[in-house]
Image (tube, rainbow, N blue to C red):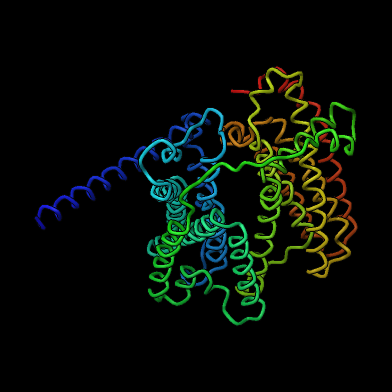
Amino acid sequence: MRTFSSGWWRVVELGRISRDLFLFKCMLLEEYRLQRSYVGSFGSYFFPLVIFILSFFLVVIFPFESTQSSSVIDTVHLLMSIYGLAVGGVALMGEQVMTRRLGQVNLLLQLPQVQNISFRRTMAIFYLKEIFFYQLYSMVPFGLGLIAGGVVAGLPLTGTLLVSLTVTMVFGLGMSLSFAISALLTRSRTLGMLAVVLIALSVVILVWTDLVDPVKLVHPLYFHKTADLVWILASFIEMVILSIFAIVVMKERVTSPVKRYRSSLGTISRLLPGNDRKKALLAKEWLELWRSGTLGPVIAGFLAPLLAIYGLVYLLNRGLDADIRFNVVFFGTLIGYFGVMTYSWLNNVEQNESLDVMPVTVSEVIATKLRTYFLLTCLVSTIYIVAVGLIQGEPILIPAGVLVGLSTNFYVAYVTARLTGIRTNTMLLDAVTLMKFTLLVTPPLLVLVVLSFYLEDGTLWSLSAVIIVSAILVLAGLLFRMGIGPRWDGGRFGF
């Protein structure tokens, strides 16, 4: 009887493993098909190709001084940890998939609603799929680019292989930390935010007081300094513990929130500028942001990358002894670039198919979303520039920084709207659209970055050049604004 019972449970466990592997395979195919349906067969391979080219030229142009110590290695590891943090919020994504309508897309994450499988188990498989997919889709091309660039630059093969390995581990560590935090947020928003604040304060205190070498906070990177395998082992153990913690604390029963609101569209519209038509659309946009709980994530998604870049530069200057001097005008040039994701967020709040039967044009909706975008980002970016200028002791450069920040924000927003309309999150994955966006946005931002370094000399020509380029960006933005109507009014809201 004991043998029969033991064999029976073994069959059950094997069945579960077989089911999990089958679901893992199906989720991979689902991700692949989604990519192809959005950007086509060429576009789905374009992103890994771009990553390979960027990492290749990174090593060729800035070869590592040594495999143990290099500011290039430090920067790459820190950027990849930020990348891992950015893509690791899969628990929050899973909660949104389970509780919100996604139009024509129904992911396999919704299986727990109709099949005999727990949400935790489904999310665990989905998380493993995300790790595998992002490693294959981005980290493998990045590592191959490092290795190929190292061969061209004459670097030792073992050194570039080791950097590729540790960069991959840094990405995984960031992703597992983000997964754990997002899982805690699904359980309790208060506990999740408290965890974020405590982690951030701990890092700031440790770095600011010089109690701990900042490099030690990124264990795979510290391995380059010490060649001690303990740090690699510690990173792997931390990834496993954080992943298990995330799965255990994740809320098992996910239900759609139900709330009641008073009718306030008319009240809000009367407080907004513009004619009745514009005020009604803008009020609708604000109500959707507020009632969907998206207002906070939208603002955080705009501010977090700016703070992360400033923190990265700070760590490089203080903890890594890198001779990098970026003034407040440099940080102003980043505002427009990072605002693209905020505009994309605004396009994800609602499904627009129903507007096809309403007396409203696509360009009117785009204009409304842009007005909402500017109301959200202009104040936040100005406060950010003023704060950075005061912290760095550059009050004289704050007006130039604010000018650059607002002009780049204005220009990039209208370029994005002209190229992608209300489908930013999918059209920017298209190879042709992405190339157009890169060619239109990168050159002027690079010009402003170069000019920002000359402002340190206090020469009048550099300040004049910054003002002239900013004015040109505003004029160019107005031209792109004029092209939004002819480009999009002939189309539909739905696919």
Compared across the picture, whether 341 is left or right of 400 comes to left
Compared across the picture, whether 193 is left or right of 93 comes to right
Query: Could you say where residue 390 lies in the image, as x and y percent from the top left?
Result: 83, 67
> Who's the residue at 62% across and 65% down the image?
194
Quick one: quadrant of the N terminus?
bottom left
Quarter of the view holding residue 168: bottom left
> Who's the residue at 51% across and 41% down the image?
98
Q: Nearer the viewer, residue 285 or 488?
A: 285
Compared across the picture, whether 308 is left or right of 118 comes to right
Query: Could you say where residue 101 lies in the image, as x and y percent from the top left?
Result: 56, 34
Quarter of the view holding residue 348: top right
Query: Could you say where residue 142 lies in the image, as x and y percent from the top left?
Result: 47, 51
Quick one: quadrant of the C terminus?
top right
Q: How many marks?
A: 0
Query: Could you say where residue 213 lies in the image, as x and y percent from the top left?
Result: 57, 78
Q: Nearer the viewer, residue 238 or 147?
A: 238
Above or below for 45 versus 222: above
Above or below for 335 versus 174: above
Q: Is residue 58 visible?
A: no
Compared across the picture, whether 231 is left or right of 84 comes to left
Above or below for 201 versus 30: below
Quarter of the view holding residue 245: bottom left
Q: Is residue 376 visible?
A: yes
Q: Nearer the viewer, residue 115 or 139?
A: 115
> Who's the residue at 64% across and 66% down the image?
197
